[in-house]
Image: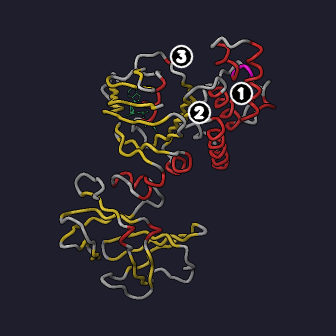
Amino acid sequence: MAVAFRNVTKVFPDGTVALDGFNLDFETGEFVVLLGPSGSGKTTACRILAGLEPATSGRIEVGGRDITDLPPRERGMSMVFQNYALYAHKSVYDNIAYPLRVRGVPKQRIEGRVRDTARLLQIDELMGRRPGQLSGGQAQRVAVARALVWQPEICLMDEPLSNLDAILRLQTRTELKRLHAELKTTFVFVTHDQEEAMTLGNRIAVLKDGRLVQFDTPREIYHRPASRFVAEFIGRPAMNIIEGSVAGGVFRAEGLDLAVPDRSDGTAALGIRPEHILLHRSPRDGMQPFHLDVKELVEPDILLFLSSGPLSLVVRSKADLANLDDGAEVYLELPRDRLHFFDAETGLRRP
Ligand code: ATP
């Protein structure tokens, strides 16, 4: 069953345009991640989908049915908020049981469902505690349990891991993936952390300025970014971008002449990921020498910050380069099948 945003625009009363003709289609059962910089409209999209915020224009559809005006209660969706929003005066048990009670589930069935869900999230020992007596990670699990206990069709999660420390974040990520595989509930997960998005989503929707700029698998987003923005947003260190121009099958920038077959002439931005540049100690055809400015160890790899005149590039290598000293001369090979070209004006990927 398809879930769709159709040309959704959201203008807040102060004139802020949070979503600007936003379109997105996905299938139930997917793990969809909404990724984008702060202020790109991710939370707003989530809240509109859940019915917590009205759209200014456009429609939300589920299975072809227009649910734009349906109250949140009737949408079959639950939401996990960044601050968890647990009821402070209720026990963990009562927090988890709450959505079942308000839906009129018979008492004898509530207990079983709460216990099953708590077991799934490994919080069955905490049932008698109040939210104030929980660690951040435990509170997060309780919030997820409360969102899943009534078996909603879609579970929306707005940056649910951002209050957790790094190790717990990693663990919880893995658990969310496991939960998704087990429950087959549709997950819509908001984050501005590209690494989190890449590991969690089976598809990632990248937002910028209230618009969808790419919706694809993590692999496609990484290897075929639709624009320079996506290319630079995904991957650390960021993709190298060299501005120059193509003429007669050669890309030229200061310090670089590169044969690039089948390219139309004109200004362009060339991109290559740090791990795709090959290093050589002896001269290569057409490439000027680069000098090593700084090297950083990010075990098991090494990052080399190189420059040649005005051109600076980062290379990520697996080679043992411990004996390469600052100032050393190296030659680079930019494999053709690893190059990306973006329109100099629009930033869009050139075929
Ligand atoms: P973040 O990662 O920082 O949470 P986001 O991508 O989730 O950002 P939104 O919270 O959806 O972005 O906000 C999108 C834009 O709408 C921002 O410019 C934000 O300041 C604005 N905005 C959000 N809520 C309101 C509001 N109630 N009134 C006015 N502007 C708002």
Q: How far across and how far down the image is residue 96, in percent? A: 69, 23
Q: What residue type is labelled 1?
A: Gly
Residue at the image position 34 percent from the left and 29 percent from the top: 8
Of the image marks 2 and 1, the number of the one nearer the N terminus: 1
- Residue at the image point whose x is 56% and y is 25% from the top: 78
Q: Look at the numbered discs 2 and 1 and tell me whether their residues touch, using CB distance below 8 Å.
A: no
Q: Which mark is residue 232?
A: none
Q: Nearer the viewer, residue 222 or 139?
A: 222
SS of the residue under disc 2: loop
Which residues are the magenta region?
A: 91-95
Quadrant of the frame with the C terminus: bottom left
Pick the front one: 288 or 75: 75
Q: In which quarter of the image is residue 53?
A: top left
Q: What residue type is labelled 2?
A: Thr
Residue 253 position, x and y percent, is 26, 71
Picture residue at 26% right of the left edge, 72% below the top: 261
Count residues near mark 2 (Cα–Cα under 10 Å), then give few for <14, some for 14-19, many for 20+.
some
Q: Which mark is residue 132?
A: 1
Residue 321 in the image: above or below residue 174: below
Task: Tell which circle, 2 or 3, labels the residue nearer the N-terminal end.
Answer: 3
**Residue highlighted by disc 2:** 185
As drawn, 48 above or below 274: above
Residue at label 3?
73
Say which label, 1 or 3, has the lower sequence index.
3
Report if the CB atoms under discs 1 and 3 are less than 8 Å apart.
no
Could you give the CA–CA distance between mark 1 and mark 3, rounded to whole angstroms?
27 Å
**Residue flagged by tag 3: what amino acid is it?**
Arg
Q: How crowded is mark 3: few (under 14 residues within 10 Å), some or many (20 or more)?
A: few
